[in-house]
Each structure stands twice: as C-alpha cells, then as structure tokens.
C-alpha cells in the first residue's frame, strides 16, 4: 500500500486533450490498484472526466472529497452531486476545506447525519491554517483527522499542530508543492515565495540530493504525516515517486531539510480564505439537475434553492459549451 493519494485538481485546468489523456492514465492506474484519490466538484470539469473512466465502477478505490461548508443546502447538494459522479456506493472521506469556521461544527455534524443514508461517508477531516490552528486543537475536534497544506516549500501551519497530533492522522496536501516539476507558486492565501537558488543548491549539494528528491523524501520520511496528496500527469513520474517512497533518508539529513524549510518557507501569516463554490458554474448538467431534483423530492432543499439551482444549471450549460471549444482550440495549438 502506498502513502500517496493522487491529486486531481489539474484535471480541471484548461489544457490540451493530450495532457488530459496522460492524467487519465495515471488515475486509471490508481483505480486498478484501489488506491485513494483526492477529488472535488470545485476542480473544474475534473469529475466529468473521471466519471468516464470505464474501470471506475469496478474499482474499490476510496475518495478524499474536498468540500466547503457554508450552509446546509449547498453542502448537501455538492456532496450528493459528487457522490453521483463517482458512484453512490464509493467510500468517501470528507475533507472540509480551509474556509470552515469552527463555530459551525455542530451544524456540520447535524448536516452529515442527514446524509448518512444517502452516501457512503467514512470519516471527516478538517483543514487548519496558521490563523486558526489552535481552535482545531481544542477538545471538540480531538476525534477528527486533519489535512494541511504542507510540503518542503509550503508550510501553512506551524509545528505546534504537528506535535499535538496525538492519535489523529494528518494528510499533507500538495506534498511536493504545486507539482512534480513546479517549485514555488501563488495561492489564495499566500504570495509566490522568492527563494535563493544558490543557497538551496548549495544545501542540496551537501546532502547529495536533487531538488525533487529533497521535496519527496522530506514528506515521505516525515513521521507526522500518515499520507501525502501528490499530483502528476505522467505514469513515468508516478513510478519515480514510488521508488522514492521506499527510499529512507538519514534523520540527520531530514533535520537539515526541516530547518531549511522552516527558515525559508514558513508562511508567517495566512489570510482567511473566502468561501467559493465554483461547482455551480462548472458541472455536469445532467447530474447537477439529477442531484438537485433528488434533494427536492427528499425535502432537503428549499424551493428557493431549487430555483436558484435551475438558474445555475443554465449558466453551467453555457460554460460547458465554452469549455468544449476552448479545449479544442488549445489542443489544435499544441
């Protein structure tokens, strides 16, 4: 069993069909091996593409579903939609995203209880950040596992949270940074980090490690992390990661990487992320309406939410058409 959970955010990007096909091959490999996959209805049309994979229905892979909790209706709709897209019998670990407000814990758990017989939910994980991580260390969150934006080049929580892990499991999101070949990047809560290439290369030279080895071995040998989410578009890169996963890094070398990461990549202050629900703009229209209508019949959404949903359905149809031609043009230009 691998420590790697496959990330699929890139499958929602506007890129060429060739790139999509390469990513699908990697996902197919994970489905055949019954390894866990990280998904979200907010990753563009990624679920649309995953849904078309033939082996999906036979696979026993579980899914780590990233989802926002802003109110009961939108949460249930996104959850049911996502479940229908991958197969309602699929086991789901729910990752409540970084926009969650801890005061809403009771409301969330009540909502989860409502969906108990509608989806196959295994467990709930929360996503702390520097500005609120101490709230997640309180007793009422003690039974929940965590997901964190954490890698050699990105530290959205400090070590206080890791040292207080107790019996909980912690999953590192974007465990290589932005990707297999990408080092630093912008995101919703931080600006692109400027780092000293010469200083880093000098450190890696002393350790006899490549940049990729340093990033991979740092998370694979981190005892605080139970699993790591990594995205890659090529099987060749994935197999290279599997080899690195088996490689042990001397504790002395790991500590040098740890000190370097803390000094150069700690995000001292993370801004509070805003709730964003792009799934209402980019979705599978058929399943969007099917899930919406299902919830209406179950009296789990209001008439107003249903009508707003119909409006979003029309917007989604237009966006899907635009995306179709956009990908065609990108593919022709590649």
Image: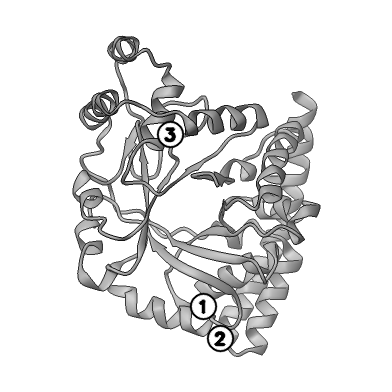
Determine which residue is flagged by label 3: 177
Q: Nearer the viewer, mark 1 or mark 2?
A: 1
Q: In the rendering, which numbered label is found on residue 302?
A: 2
Query: Relative to 316, is 111 above or below?
Result: below
Q: Earlier in the sequence, mark 1 or mark 3?
A: 1
Comes first in the chain, label 2 or label 3: 3
x, y percent for residue 188: 39, 45
Give the left or right position of residue 308, taking residue 260 as reference: right
Q: Nearer the viewer, residue 305 or 219?
A: 219
Q: Are marks 1 and 2 in contact (CB under 8 Å)?
A: yes
Judging depth in this view, the residue of 187 and 151 nearest the camera is 151
Element on which disc 3 rests: loop
Q: Residues within 10 Å of mark 3 (few under 14, many from 20)?
A: many
Of tags 2 and 3, the one toward the viewer is 3
Task: Report the residue marked by disc 1.
Answer: 73
Q: Quadrant of residue 334?
A: top right
Name the element at disc 1.
helix
> What whole-number distance in Å separates the C-alpha atoms at marks 1 and 3?
33 Å
Relative image position of residue 248 (x, y in whole percent): 40, 29
321 relative to 125, above or below = above
Percent position (x, y) of residue 180? 52, 29
* Pointers 1 and 3 in contact (C-beta within 8 Å): no
Residue 276 at what x, y percent from top left?
A: 46, 58
Q: Is residue 191 visible?
A: no
Q: Residue at x 65, y 50 (%)?
A: 46
Q: Which mark is residue 269?
A: none
Q: Nearer the viewer, residue 26 or 320?
A: 26
């Amino acid at each position: 069993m691998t420590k790697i959970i496959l990330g699929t955010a890139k499958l929602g990007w506007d890129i060429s069909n060739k790139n999509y096909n390469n990513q699908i091959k990697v996902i197919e490999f994970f489905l055949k091996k019954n390894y866990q996959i990280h998904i979200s209805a907010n990753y563009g049309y990624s679920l649309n593409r995953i849904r078309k994979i033939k082996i999906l229905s036979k696979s026993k892979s579980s899914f780590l579903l990233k989802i926002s909790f802003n109110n009961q209706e939108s949460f249930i709709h996104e959850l049911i939609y996502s479940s229908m897209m991958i197969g309602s019998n699929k086991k789901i670990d729910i990752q409540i995203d970084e926009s969650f407000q801890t005061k809403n814990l009771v409301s969330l758990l009540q909502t989860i209880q409502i969906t108990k017989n509608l989806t196959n939910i295994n467990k709930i994980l929360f996503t702390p950040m520097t500005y609120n991580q101490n709230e997640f260390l309180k007793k009422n969150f003690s039974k929940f596992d965590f997901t964190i934006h954490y890698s050699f080049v990105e530290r959205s929580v400090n070590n206080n949270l890791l040292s207080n892990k107790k019996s909980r499991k912690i999953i590192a999101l974007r465990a290589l940074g932005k990707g297999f070949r990408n080092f630093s990047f912008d995101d919703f809560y931080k600006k692109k980090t400027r780092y000293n290439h010469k200083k880093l290369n000098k450190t890696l030279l002393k350790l006899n490690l490549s940049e990729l080895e340093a990033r991979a071995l740092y998370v694979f040998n981190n005892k605080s992390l139970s699993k790591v989410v990594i995205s890659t578009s090529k099987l060749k890169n994935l197999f290279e990661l599997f080899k690195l996963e088996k490689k042990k890094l001397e504790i002395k070398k790991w500590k040098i990487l740890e000190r370097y990461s803390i000094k150069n990549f700690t995000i001292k202050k993370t801004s509070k992320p805003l709730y964003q629900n792009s799934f209402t703009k980019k979705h599978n229209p058929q399943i969007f309406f099917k899930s919406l209508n299902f919830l209406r019949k179950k009296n789990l959404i209001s008439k107003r939410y249903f009508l707003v949903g119909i409006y979003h359905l029309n917007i989604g149809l237009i966006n899907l058409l635009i995306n179709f031609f956009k990908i065609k043009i990108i593919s022709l230009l590649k």
